[in-house]
Amino acid sequence: MKLLIKWLLYATALMALSELHPGIKVAHFAVAMSAALVIGLLHMLLRPLLVLLTLPVTVLSLGLFVFIINALLFWMAAAMLTDFRVDSFGDALVGSLIYSALGMLIDSALKQLFPPQ
């Protein structure tokens, strides 16, 4: 149940992001749901490998290169889906930052609703 609610909230965050930032377009809620799923899978599968491969650059940049990795994964998700569009890498960077901030709010709210047992 918690996973389904989280997925719906992340899709809603993507819809809100498309309204907030003009460089990101989501056609409708079903696309937002599939985009949230693809972004989640990319973060789960590719992000650890990319962070490991770019560890020296990440250390030298004091961790700021992780933002670039997140933007690349956000942009990659948009490239994989037809009705989810990100205009440029700058839009992907801003979009991934806002999406991550909204995700932290969602995770915090879900921890309050579903306390660990």
Image (spheres, rainbow, N blue to C red):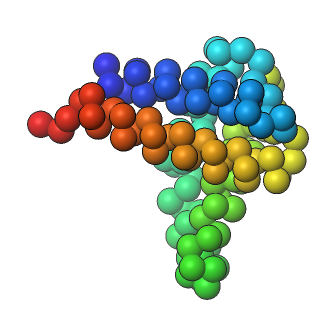
| Whole-percent x, y for residue 24 in the image | 79, 35
| Whole-percent x, y for residue 85 in the image | 81, 32
- Compared with 21, 48 (above or below) is below
Q: Nearer the viewer, residue 62 or 38?
A: 62
Which residue is most to the right?
87
Which residue is most to the front?
20
Q: Quadrant of the N terminus?
A: top left
| Whole-percent x, y for residue 48 in the image | 50, 59
Number of marks present in the image shown: 0
Q: Quadrant of residue 66?
A: bottom right
Q: Is residue 81 visible?
A: no
- Compared with 55, 103 (above or below) is above
Q: Residue at x 45, y 40 (%)?
A: 105
Q: Quadrant of residue 95?
A: top right
Q: Residue at x 54, y 62 (%)?
A: 49
Q: Is residue 61 visible?
A: yes
Q: Residue at x 32, y 25 (%)?
A: 2
Q: Quadrant of residue 68?
A: bottom right
Q: Quadrant of the C terminus?
A: top left
| Whole-percent x, y for residue 17 in the image | 68, 33
The answer to whether residue 69 is left or right of residue 43 is right
Q: Residue at x 57, y 53 (%)?
A: 46
The answer to whether residue 102 is left or right of residue 98 is left
